[in-house]
Amino acid sequence: MLDLLVTGATLPDGRTGIDIAVADGRIVDVAPAIQAQAARVIDAAGLLVTPPFVDAHFHMDATLSYGLPRVNASGTLLEGIALWGELKPVLTEEAIAERALAYCDWAIARGLLAIRTHVDVCDPRLLAVRALLDVKKRVAPWLDLQLVAFPQDGVLRYSPARDDPGCKLSALQLLEQALDLGVDVVGGIPHFERTMADGAESVRLLCELAAARGLRVDMHCDESDDPLSRHIETLAFHTQRLGLHGRVTGSHLTSMHSMDNYYASKLIPLIAESGVNAVANPLINITLQGRQDSYPKRRGMTRVPELMAAGVTVAFGHDCVMDPWYSLGSGDMLEVAQMGLHVAQMTSQDAMRACFAAVTQNPARILGLDGYGLAPGCHADFVLLQARDAVEAIRLRATRLAVVRRGQIVASAAPAVSTLTLDGKQRAIDFLRSPPGC
């Protein structure tokens, strides 16, 4: 007997009337009209069943800390970094873990079951690293958490003698300690180093470290409006040189929005050739970038459609939720996809479906998730959405009717339905588009 049978589902690839059979935490069959007994049956009734949402770029060590120690009055990236520097000395491991666990609950309820989070290593206590390694173990039955060793203050710029008197370890040594403790990915922030040359050197050092340890790389790269911030070019070069194809990600890449088209026409093929992935963070970068512009004002998100057209794997990240950089957010990756769609003007049907892939299958590929998808042999992890297809899911930021992890329902919600009372008569409205022919 099956543990779970989902009937009458629509899948993201457009197939309809599909059943999904689950046993022992794995999908065992995906086909129309499966004839089998099951301990539990979910009638999808033609609605969309998708693999879980995946966030390829987040900062869980800072999440839900909005207002501590004060609010970011300017709303800028640099004030957010300064605020984080003020907050770090008074952080406790327990407080970081408590906020992170609360956010993980939000994520699971939203069908977000895998997150790559950057964790600041410019702290001789490695407080956030230890807290999030503990959180990773605690949430493992329900959520895949991948940690990036992130030198927030710059791996070369950070000065322990100045910033942490008594500490004799460099940021590179602290980063290596974090990796030794079990952090998964090597991070960096070359555009925050003191000079362009230092930024390029940091990329070299960190890529060589990752290659030596057999790890993935994910760098905050060129998160500025400066068209001459070109560390992504250096990242692509060292990826090629060290044979790291497919294991390296450039996050943000907002300077590409300000580059001239000739240079971008050279750069994008280099990124594609090197196999470097790209993560755009539309919510945060549409608010942070272009701050010094009057009008016309730059949008401040990287060239998503052009990167996708070149064959680069592109994902959207949430980046921040209620922290020193961003006061909003709720862990809803459909909100992220919706903002990305609008900012990039990706409004064709295929482009909108590509935006849905940017919060599901593309980030899963970037994280290297094993057993992700809706095929026999995959983990039985999926979400039933109150929508008939991926485009409608983005339009409505669809209700997660059921969230399934390893074949078990871990979250559920009632359908979003409003009741109208007009001319003394009541009727329900759910905002779904009418089926063709109605």
Image: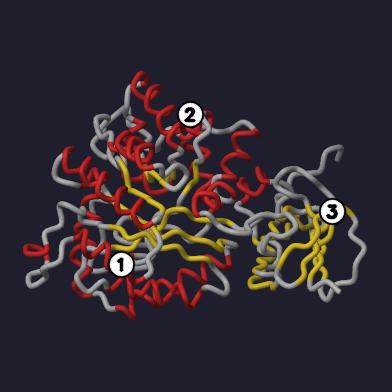
For the point 33% across and 78% down, the residue is: 95
Marked residue nearer the N-terminal end (3 or 1): 3
Q: Can residue 424 be seen in this view?
A: no
Q: Work out whether residue 370 or residue 240 is closer to the camera in this orientation and state it.
A: 240
Q: How many numbered markers are drawn?
A: 3
Which element type, helix, strand or loop, lies under badge 2? helix
The residue nearer to you, when weighing 123 against 398, is 123
Q: Which picture quadrant has residue 224?
A: top left
Name the kind of residue labelled 3 in the image: Ala
Q: Mark 2 Cα within 10 Å, few/some/many (few <14, many 20+)? A: some
Above or below, 312 relative to 420: above
Asked if residue 284 can be seen in this view, the reply is: yes
User: Going 33% across and 65% down the picture, which residue do you hit?
Assistant: 179
Q: How far apart are marks 1 and 2 (CA)?
A: 35 Å
In what quadrant of the picture does the C terminus appear?
top right
Q: Which mark is residue 178?
A: 1
Amino acid type, residue under disc 2 in the picture: Glu
- Residue behind mark 3: 31
Question: Which residue has dot 2 on it?
Answer: 306
